[in-house]
Amino acid sequence: MESVKFGQADGAHIGKSVLIKGELSGSEDLYVDGEVEGRIELGAHNLAIGPNGRVHANVQARDVTIHGKVQGNIIAGERVELKSSASVVGDIVTGRIIVEEGAFFKGSIDIQRESASRAAEPRPAATAAAATPAQASLISK
Amino acid sequence: MSSALQAFLRLFRTSPAADPLSGPAPGEERIKRRSSGLAEFGRRIAGEQPLNILDLGPTSPANIAYLTGLGHKVYNEDVLLASADPDLLTTGEDGKPAINVAEFLNSNLRYEREQFDAVLCWDTADYMPEILVKPMVDRIHLVTRPGASVLSFFHTKDAGPAAPYYRYHIIGPEMLDLQAVWKPGSNPRNRGPMFRLQRIFQNRHVENLFRDYASLKFFLARDNVREIIVVR
């Protein structure tokens, strides 16, 4: 299986036995291999969803790379990449999209480079929240 | 084996659709062909204005890249896969298994009225359970604006249960790449197509199916398929 590089060493990492319910925001890259229900906002940082990742959330980040499952809308300032194992149900707004053969997608794709970039710029509130998950509860499964 | 014999045999491997069980291994079959229907569809969606286009086939990276490259917003929904959802099965009045049409429409093709400017229907109607075909066509009518184009394919000949089911990838303004899709399984030669051709629609049936639409334009393709541009 292709490795997901960023997030494991450079950014925050949510392991596959972790379930988070609530809003996740941060000012570093995030790798999710567990389960998230709620919302993820990373501003100008990147999100990778690992092969075990299951996200039921609206997502906003600069680059979003998906190996696992996402149910929710995605706004990416730069790029969304659906790997072959990805399953996405939701609407995507992004500057660029890459879909690998084998990926499942149900929803809409809107390529809006400028507006997506603007949407991905970190909001003051999100920047202030930074680093630690706010309003999130961690439940070990 | 001599190189001449190998070259000779290769001549017979260029059209796997003719005999799907003796062509390349399932998953490898790709046929590129010109499509007059797609060419007409392309002309109808050309222009500066971004359009809302609904693709009802399996997720195709090529279609997404092509249509978004033209500046359009793409919606993707694999209705055939959705029609095979076991959760749709119910028991009919006669006690036999039946498909819950209301439930299918509750969870699929749920869009606003007149939302779409164009729909890629491909050959989903040929493979879909009959009870869902008319409701699907009526729902497409509801969610497309007047003047919208629907590209639909219909087989002209029943090629039997082994007839391949294809995914359609757009690789140019009038070129399609057909990828045969087979059931998952350990023995690729005996797996059979992912979906089975259910019926052959005659022209009259097609016209009845789309009777609420403004017009139909037929194109006869070489591989026993009628390509139809339906105008809402």
Image (cartoon, coloured by chain):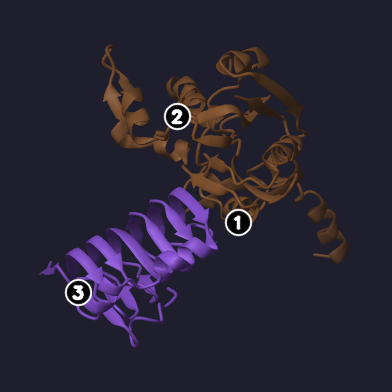
Chain colours: A purple, B brown
Secondary structure at badge 3 equals loop
Label 2 to label 1: alpha-carbon separation: 26 Å
Q: CA distance from mark 3 to mark 1?
A: 35 Å
**In the structure shown, which secondary structural element does the residue marked by tag 1 occupy?**
helix
- Tag nearer the camera, 3 or 1: 3
Residue labelled with disc 1: B65
In the rendered view of the protein, which quadrant contains the C terminus of chain B? Answer: top right
- Which residue is outermost to the bottom? A9
Q: Is residue A140 left or right of residue B199?
A: left
Count every numbered label the image shows and give the total. Answer: 3
Which quadrant is home to the N terminus of chain B? bottom right
Neighbourhood count class around disc 3 (C-alpha, 10 Å): few under 14, some 14–19, many 20 upward: some
- Mark 2 residue type: Arg
Looking at the image, the residue that sits furthest to the right is B4
When the figure is inspected, residue B39 is found, relative to residue A79, above or below; the finding is: above
Task: Give the number of the disc on residue B113.
Answer: 2
Q: State the residue position of label 3.
A: A133
Q: Is residue A66 among the parts visible in the rendering?
A: no
Is B94 rendered above or below residue B80? above
- Residue B107 falls left or right of residue B117: left
Residue type indicated by callout 3: Pro
